[in-house]
Amino acid sequence: GAVVSQHPSWVICKSGTSVKIECRSLDFQATTMFWYRQFPKQSLMLMATSNEGSKATYEQGVEKDKFLINHASLTLSTLTVTSAHPEDSSFYICSARDPRVSGEQYFGPGTRLTVT
Amino acid sequence: DAKTTQPTSMDCAEGRAANLPCNHSTISGNEYVYWYRQIHSQGPQYIIHGLKNNETNEMASLIITEDRKSSTLILPHATLRDTAVYYCIVRVWTGGATNKLIFGTGTLLAVQP
């Protein structure tokens, strides 16, 4: 299957700072990427859909000013958690749709964010 | 997209077949059944999907009932590395950019030595 990478794999930041997470599709161009968040022992929750060259579409209840998404190229989407707080500590996972394979979605390995 | 119901957890002996059920009684005619799994602290991994016919690939088989209201994912020879949470998802596939995967609670499959 296609490969999606995330960077960093884990990050610790102080409360009030911002942190950026990158999601890359390594061997295909993805016009659409998705960002999920997962708390311990819970399922994945879709945060937003990221479309190349246009604004992201956020799910209900997700603050777009806090979770900034940029999809500036066909292989890169970034999620910036602004003014992070301890309650933002979570596992953030991106996925990218591969248009070559009936648009199947492939997931990145995830980024563990800890806000102290 | 239709809602799915899966058992919270299941055990399976190593080397035996693991049969994971999923109910999707409100599935529409144009909705596909997808299976993903998530090994602890990793991103989900695609397993298989189907519309109405049974499907098989190198990882698993998917059996969909004739009325399409339920399905079973079969791992023919489970190994310890198959221990994971398995998610059954139904969704419309139109090829459009708005299609998205919504995850339920899934089934935690524990393969026992």
Image (cartoon, grey):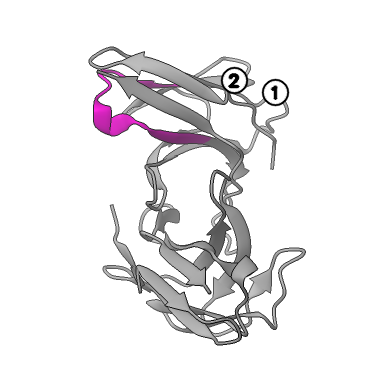
Identity of the residue drawn at 73% across and 28% down: B26
Where residue B107 appears, as percent x and y from the top left, is 51, 29
**Image check: A26 left or right of B72?**
left
Where residue A30 appears, as percent x and y from the top left, is 42, 70
- The extreme right residue here reads A61
Dot 1: within a 10 Å radius of its alpha carbon, few (fewer than 14), some, or many (20 or more) residues?
Answer: some
Q: Nearer the viewer, residue B107 or B66?
A: B107
The amino acid type found where label 1 is placed reads Ser
Residue wearing tag 2:
B70
Q: Which residues are magenta?
A: B72-87
Query: Which chain is indicated by disc 2?
Result: B
Where residue B96 appears, as percent x and y from the top left, is 58, 60
Tell me the distance, in whole angstroms, between the alpha carbons under discs 2 and 1: 7 Å
Q: Which mark is residue B25?
A: 1
Dot 2: within a 10 Å radius of its alpha carbon, few (fewer than 14), some, or many (20 or more) residues?
Answer: some
Sequence order check, earlier mark of 2 and 1: 1
Residue B90 in the image: above or below residue B14: below
Callout 2 and callout 1 share a chain: yes
Whether the residues at callouts 2 and 1 have beta carbons within 8 Å, the answer is yes
Asked whether residue A32 is in view, the answer is no
Q: Nearer the viewer, residue B62 or A39?
A: A39
